[in-house]
Image: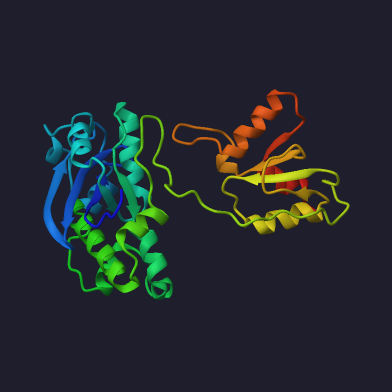
Amino acid sequence: MKGITDFIALDVETANADLASICSIGLVHFKGGDVFKSITVLVDPEDDFDPINVSIHGIRPEDVAGKPTMAKVFPVVGAALQDAAIVHHSPFDRTALWRAAEKYGADGLPCYWLDNLQVARKTWDRFKLDGGYGLANLAQAFSLEFRHHDAAEDARVAGLLLLEAIADGGVPLQQWLDDLGYASSSPGVAPRRIKAPVYPKVARKGDGDGPLLGETVTFTGRLSMSRDKAASQASVAGADVDDNVTKRTTILVVGDQDLRATKGQEKSTKHRKTEELIAKGRSIKIVGESDFMVMTAN
């Protein structure tokens, strides 16, 4: 993935609220800083069309009658995207393609993903209070005309906005991929960040005589509060806080959405290490963030 400069912008439309119901895929190849070629693929989602979705993108059941299903589209698209950098705007598109692959038992797409919405937020502070970071608002701000909710058109604008961000912020595509990119998915495993989030060290001694007095707490997963705030709450409740699972650990607090491993979601290294220690006879409790909040409530 060294020195990537060219990329493929991608957008999908769905027939209904189920993200696996892809009915259109837009692919726009950017080469040398400009559009090289563009293609739209209509797909039979083998699902019902919701009138709300039809009103947004205008694709109707008769438009996709006789078109290939994602079962047939995946091998073709996968070959085209081999080791490519895929730019999309919001997690919707990346998630929809993974959900469709899961639905049809297809291999994951062998590519690298970059969410241009994240790039935009990190590049332009001004849109926080000026319409937000939606595709339409950003396109208007940069005088980019397009037919919104046409898959290829949305993909084209997402790609053009990335080029604007690279020009304005001076951060090359390679660096954005290194910092924000997601690795290619595989069957049953959703795309995951190439560079795992780095959490600040939060280790501290217990500073209270609350309900966790004598405990040693470690945090893992995505918490609704900052790690620092969670550590302070544990400390006030009497617990020591360690950054990693050690022989001292007595409680592992896991972000609620990471508490159970599901398809496409693996338990963290800390979570797995804790389970291994428990299997060896160590007395460690694994609790979700919500339970931690109740345990430490004043």
Task: Please give the name of the residue rendered at 11% of the width and 56% of the height, measured from the top-left corner.
Answer: 36
Q: Is residue 169 above or below residue 12?
A: below
Visual colour scheme:
rainbow
Which quarter of the rendered picture does the C terminus lie within?
bottom right
| Front one among 113 and 17 | 113
61 on left or right of 295? left
Residue found at x 11% / y 32%: 66
Q: Farthest residue toward the top? A: 280
Total count of labels = 0
Q: In this view, does 230 lie to the left or right of 144?
A: right
The residue most toward the right is: 209
Q: Is residue 266 above or below residue 32?
A: above
| Foreground of the two, 264 or 151 | 264
- For the residue pair 172 and 81, the one nearer the viewer reads as 172
**In the image, what residue occupies the spot 73% across and 34% down?**
285
Locate residue 156, reporting x and y percent. 19, 58
At 27% from the left and 48% from the top, the residue drawn is: 53
Q: Is residue 175 above or below residue 67?
A: below
User: To which quarter of the image does residue 65 belong?
Assistant: top left
The x, y position of residue 291, in whole percent, is 70, 42
| Residue 126 rendering spot, x and y as whole percentages | 40, 76
Q: Where is residue 131 in the image (x, y as percent from the top left)?
A: 37, 71
Q: Is residue 74 above or below residue 11?
A: above
